[in-house]
Amino acid sequence: MTDKCTILFLLTSPQSTENILVLLNGAGFAVNYKCVATRVDYLTYLSSGWDAIIAEYSLGDLDALEALHRMQAQGLNIPFVIVNSIDSASVAVKCMKAGAIDYLLKDELVQLPQVMRQALATETQPSQTKSELHKQDLEQRLEEQTAELGKQKQHSQQVESALQKIEVQLQTLITKNADGIVVVDRQGIVRFINPAALKLFDCKQEELLGELFGFPVVNGDNTEVDIYPHHRESAVADGSLEKIAQMRVVEIEWQGETAYLVSLRDITERKRTEQERNKLLEQAQAANRIKDEFLAVLSHELRTPLNPILGWVRLLRSGKLDANKTVQALETIERNASLQVQLINDLLSVSKILHGKLTLNPKTIDLRTTITAAIESVHLAAQAKLIKITTVFDANVGPIFGDPKRLQQVLWNLLSNAVKFTPSKGKVTVRLERVDSYAQIQVIDTGKGIKPDFLPYVFDYFRQQDSGYSRKFGGLGLGLPLVHHLVELHGGTIRAESFGEGKGATFTVKLPLMLYPSVTIQDEIQKDGNSPDLRGVRILIVDDELDNRNFLIFLLEAHGACVRAAASGHEALSSLVEEQPDLLISDIEMPEMDGYTLIRHVRSLPVEQGGQIPAIALAADAGETAQQQASGTGFTLHVPKPVEPVLLATAIAKLVEK
């Protein structure tokens, strides 16, 4: 059934009128209506016989209560419904007391059809009944509204208490937060700052509060900014460093106005760690490149001498060389083998340095003698290139205390480099003079020189100015690092100078002088030119390498010894029990049973089975540590590889007292 009605709408929005009509039409109402929005129009159409008036609470020049009073003033009793967007119990009560039949929120408009039906039904009843019903309805609504107000008041108190607790907790969180928190208004003025931010800026609250914030504030995350101390001038003076913070900005409402909450997280240490990690990564990559270059050079330098060695050996074995060519072949083989020995010695010295095992045997030294010996060792190479070596010695330079072999190694490296990198008909000057309490040695050449960008790295391990197979000069790039370390072990210093490529180089070594020199220097080693006689000496050789065994057999038999050989420690023990020799010579590095294990087994044997036999250890490590280890495990003597034939024969003769 369709309910027909006429309605006066007092609404400011046509959309609101449309929404109400759709709602009523959907509920079965046939509505004849007029929509007005001003006081003039309302008064004009008020007395046109409406079944109901629906009005918004707030209008432009007229509100709903005034409109209701205007209607009542004209003696009209039209059902008046007020619609509002604000949920307020006090406003609702005021409207109902004024005579409105209902007060609906906009989100409660679904109740409007029911309200309209009740209003239309009430219109058909006598006025007395309508008034009573309206009064009863009003009283009921007032009771409901009063109860609701009580509930809302209680709820409001609970909410207020909860908000106070939250505010206290929030204040505690902000105060104790490790991140700096700053509130900035739209003009960039600081309105709040927590202790962490004060610590970050290194200032007091009054120094920042109310001041212009130091950074542009825009919404966004993870912006990195540099934080300088507030007292920047004094901070720079005392060496303070700026900090790096990660800034995040969020738009908020602060005391009723738009503001920005800025959080600042100190990431200084993280950035420093990242920078240090990147630096270490770059260093590791550079070291890796240097390693690759060094391995390429090492492969080249070790293989190069093998070519003439193997080539001349094959020609010697062919038997087609005459006497002159045979001498040339042997000289070439010996020269290149010596070169390989020098390369290997450099590598071993570096290994000892890196492991802190390089030791010195110091004594009183006259540097003139050491320099002269080093010059003699490079004399032939200099003569071949027509290079003149000049010495300038200061007579006032006294003795020093050091290892003569190691210092000669220092000077040999410096001189050989000078000769190597100086072109034909060049000049090398060696100058010795006293500077304060130091003996100063300068090796000055007119050669290739050093690039300025390479000069800081000239003493680094495995670094060469020219690397790779395109190098003009040979070597592993280990000489100068060895020199640097050996000089420092003597308590001295070394520096390199050069005005650039093609302008020569100067290496200056300073060594501390002896303040209280002892008596004159004497040579402690006298070499005996006579060949030891080992006739009748029975020797057992143990070495897993066939070539080494054959070499030792030939060498010792040439001195008259009677030699037996074993290829392993187990074979040596069996041979020792069968027939006791006068002396045992064993390699150290052997599979299954090394030399140290073998000598422990030998020393555990009874005397009559060879338990006290003199024993010589052969090892590639020629240092004092190796000698101590060899003797500590039962060996009588340690002889380094490569073996010097006369040295080995002399050692054997001494041990067997021949």
Image (cartoon, rainbow, N blue to C red):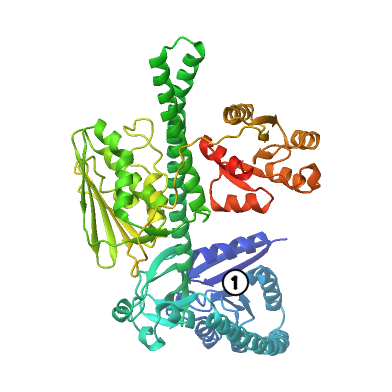
Front-lying residue, 82 or 472: 472
Q: Is residue 94 left or right of residue 128?
A: left
In the rendered image, residue 113, in percent from the top left (x then y), is placed at 67, 68
Residue position marked by numbered label 1 in the rendering: 106
Tag 1: residue type?
Answer: Lys
Picture layout, residue 642 above or below residue 266: above
Picture layout, residue 138 above or below residue 658: below
In the rendered image, residue 452, in percent from the top left (x then y), is placed at 25, 48
Sort mark 1 into few (<14), some (14-19) or many (20+) by Cα contacts within 10 Å: some
**In the picture, which quadrant includes the C terminus?**
top right
| Identity of the residue drawn at 59% across and 86% down | 168
Front-lying residue, 90 or 330: 330
Front-lying residue, 52 or 412: 412
Residue 221 in view, yes or no:
no
| Identity of the residue drawn at 70% across and 71% down | 114
**In the picture, which quadrant includes the N terminus?**
bottom right
Q: Is residue 185 left or right of residue 113?
A: left
| Identity of the residue drawn at 59% across and 63% down | 21
